[in-house]
Image (cartoon, helix red, strand yellow):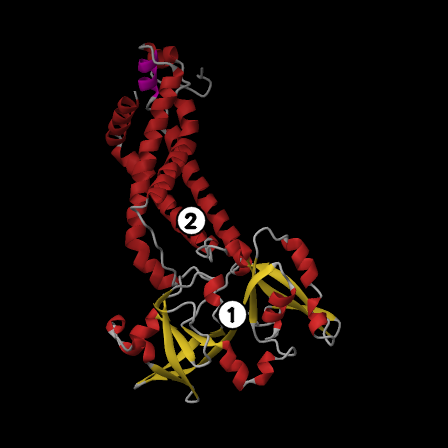
Amino acid sequence: MILFNIKIAVRNIWKNRVFSMINIAGLGLSMACCLVISLYIWNELSFDSFHLRKANIFRITEKQNQAGSFFNVAVTPGPLAPALQKDFPEIQNTVRFGSWSGVLKSGNQRFEQNRILYTENSLFDIFDFQLVKGNRKTALLAPNEIVISEKLAAQYFGNRWEKDPALLSQRFRLNNETDFVLAGVAKDVPENSSIQFDVLLPINQLFSSDKWSNQWGSNNFHTYILTKQGVDINKLAKKLEKQLHVYNDKTEDLMQLQPLREQYLYSKFDFKTDWGLRSDIKYIRIFTGVGLLLLLIACINFINLSTARSLKRSTEVGVRKVNGASRLQLVMQFLMESIVVASIAGFMAAVLIIFAQPLIQAYTGYRLTIDYSSWFFLGLFIVFIMIIGVVAGLYPAFVLSSFKPLRVMKYGHVSRGDKY
């Protein structure tokens, strides 16, 4: 029965080629726009999802008391992380990040680097950033070690850097002042990571050269904690709130916990104390509304065109009813026709996206990544097409299947009152 309905649907689409092309083009263009928006939203919501322990990673932020007014900031004092790990059994591990920039030189290669982070080895225990060269258990423990990304390894040592047996003994100099030895090469940070870096430097080196950075009066670092499984986050947040006063009785600043999963879309601070990739949840809401509106308009357009053709198909409905076709059978036939149209429009949308990818990246800087061979993507795409086909074809199907066969066969047309 399904194959028969598909055959009839294809025949009707081919018979009314001009009408079908208009319907398919409008629906396909709307579906392409909706798919692009959906991919953007999917990517935005997937930020930091590659970290296995993301549910237990939190950033410490502050509400700073300045002349009686509280301001939200993302930075915390240098000594905070080890103090929290020592005093709170709920905290399994901590890590600090300090943002830096400068000229990094190795041999004759010298480049300005803007994504430098001072940090510590616990970074590799908390986050799932991978080393392709070097030992993740010991990297950055010594104060003269440096870790760079794959991109920088190619920049400084050429595309065959992996073949160099002396790679991990290469030397770097930062700002013509401090010398480092290469201890590892990190896999390039995923694009959907809110924490971005090209260079990692040991935080102990910074503390030894800048004593102020490790004082309670400094607020220059992002502090992250990894909580143990089963910890009540609300209770921990309450205990941490006034803990800064315990360490520094001169401050009235309060501490807050920000889940890593909220860092990319929900970071709003009163001063420029945040760094890394950030966006805003309001854009997700706006684009979701735009995508749904586009689909709604496309479905309404499909319904109007299909309903407008209903008079021309009234004879077909009358003949099939006289020959014993039930209303349910007619509804299924017209729904199948709608689904076939949606399928063709979906294929057209996929082709449009493939050809539009370079243009989208050139004009927006946003790179679409679609794995068309993924069963997950194919499953969602088929469900998407089925929903559009059913939603767009449901009303026309019931309208077309409701004509009175006697009226149609006698006069060859129907009017508004000639239903059921």
The stretch drawn in magenta includes residue 325? no
Image location of residue 400, percent across then percent down: 39, 22
Q: Is residue 25 left or right of residue 68?
A: left
Q: Is residue 167 left or right of residue 52?
A: left
Mark 1, mark 2: which one is toward the viewer? 1
Image location of residue 261, percent across then percent down: 52, 56
**Mainly helix, strand or loop, the magenta region?**
helix
Vertical relation: 377 (above or below) 312: below
The local secondary structure at tag 2 comes to helix
Q: Nearer the viewer, residue 336 or 193?
A: 193
Q: Nearer the viewer, residue 360 or 384?
A: 384
Quarter of the figure with the N terminus: top left
Taking the spot 29% from the left edge, 44% from the top edge, the residue there is 348
The residue tagged 1 is 275
Circle 2: residue type: Ser
Res 268 visible: no
The residue tagged 2 is 38
- Crowding around mark 1 (Cα neighbors within 10 Å: few <14, some 14 to 19, many 20+) is some
Res 138 visible: yes
